[in-house]
Amino acid sequence: MNDDDPELADFQTCLLSALHQHDSADAILETLLSDDATLPFRGYVAKFEPEMLELAALLVKKWGRRTSSPVQGLQKMPH
Amino acid sequence: MLEDAFLQASLPLFEDGVVDALEWSFDVGWARPSLPEWVSALLDEYGGKGALVGHGVTYSALSGKGGERAEQWLEYLREELKVRRYVHLSEHFGFMAGGDFHRGTPLPVPLTENTLCLGCSRLRALAEVVDCPVGLENLALALSMTDVADQGRFLAGLLESVDGFLVLDLHNVYCQMMNFNCSADQILSSYPLERVREMHISGGSWMEAVTARGTPIRRDTHDDDVPEEVFALLRNALPRCPNTEVVIFERLGDTLDNPGAQERMRTDFLKMRSIVSGHE
């Protein structure tokens, strides 16, 4: 399977990191807007609602797990 | 459903023969060396009689990078399908993996020509592995009204690429109704309802925080009783989704740790069943 979208992948990595790192919408947005990875998606980001961003941050902190190996991530799953 | 509390709560329903179908999140099982005996027995029984549907949670169909992770997930699925037979198999709209995050919760993705193409490619890869219909569940979380407004069109485009089906999660619809001040009709009319083969109902919870509109935020936590509004959505949606084959009741097993919660869960399940039976 070689169907990757590097631009989208970079944006998603930046979004996940910001949501994992911060609690407040202001801090999340500041991180997103200071990263060139979000440039192609600035119009989308501009519409984010602060309360929904903070909910997403809570969910990523609860369920998100970083692993060195992508396959290892599949072997440890929430339920 | 792996918890003993889930078994205690649901056993009377199984004994009474009122559970017509079972949904199994097969990739949850991949993490375990073995499943509890009663879980395996249920999966074997329902799989054997053609009443088991599969629902993956970690494929991350709309991740910008699939790579080794997606390939491995599909390989695990090939192995899974050697063991169990599913009537159909679904996953979630959205992405959870990116960078070194390899598990998480599904998040929305902007609808563009590129993201639609990417998602179609991932769905086709999934469809090539299985010998049954494949589908996607609508997402509860939206980061803006744009996500709410675009999800139906996005799902329609994705599902068309594999002639797939929609898992219409009614509590997810309810979350978006509450969080974005939308009507059920606004959301449902944007979805490809002719593609619904499966529905989900569940309960959830409220956050203390409020939206800019001053309303509390609804979360899809599967940890409480089903609100009357979600039963009303079920009554509303069933006649609009003529190809519905199964309605699944979702509840986290570890939230059923007392007899009262277990009793209310059974009551909700039977109410769901009565609504579905009354519609048929």
Image (cartoon, coloured by chain):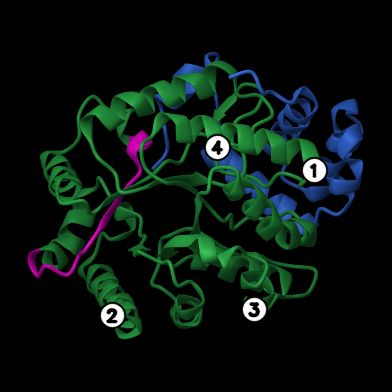
Chain colours: A blue, B green
Residue A65 in percent (x, y) is at 54, 29
Q: Which residue is mark 3?
A: B185
Q: CB atoms at circles 1 and 2 under 8 Å apart?
A: no
Task: Let me know if residue B135 appears in the view.
Answer: yes
Q: Which residue is mark 2?
A: B277
Does B131 sit above or below residue B214? Answer: above
- Determine the CA span between mark 1 and mark 4: 16 Å
In primary-sequence order, the first of circles 1 and 4 is 1
In primary-sequence order, the first of circles 4 and 2 is 4
Tag 3, which secondary structure?
A: helix
Residue B172 in percent (x, y) is at 55, 63
In primary-sequence order, the first of circles 2 and 3 is 3
In primary-sequence order, the first of circles 1 and 2 is 1
Does B255 sit above or below residue B24? Answer: below
Q: Nearer the viewer, residue B246 or B233?
A: B246
Task: Let me know if residue B62 appears in the view.
Answer: no
Tag 2, which secondary structure?
A: helix
Asked if badge 2 and badge 3 are on a common chain, one would say yes
- Looking at the image, residue B279 sits to the left or right of residue B106; the answer is left
Disc 1 residue type? Thr
B25 in the magenta segment: yes
In primary-sequence order, the first of circles 1 and 3 is 1
Q: CB atoms at circles 3 and 4 under 8 Å apart?
A: no
Disc 3 residue type? Asp
Disc 4 residue type? Leu
Does B211 sit above or below residue B257? Answer: below
Q: Which mark is residue B112?
A: 1
Q: Which residue is mark 4?
A: B123
- Determine the CA span between mark 2 and mark 3: 23 Å
- Which quadrant, please, contains the C terminus of chain B? bottom left
Q: Residue at x 62, y 32 (%)?
A: B121
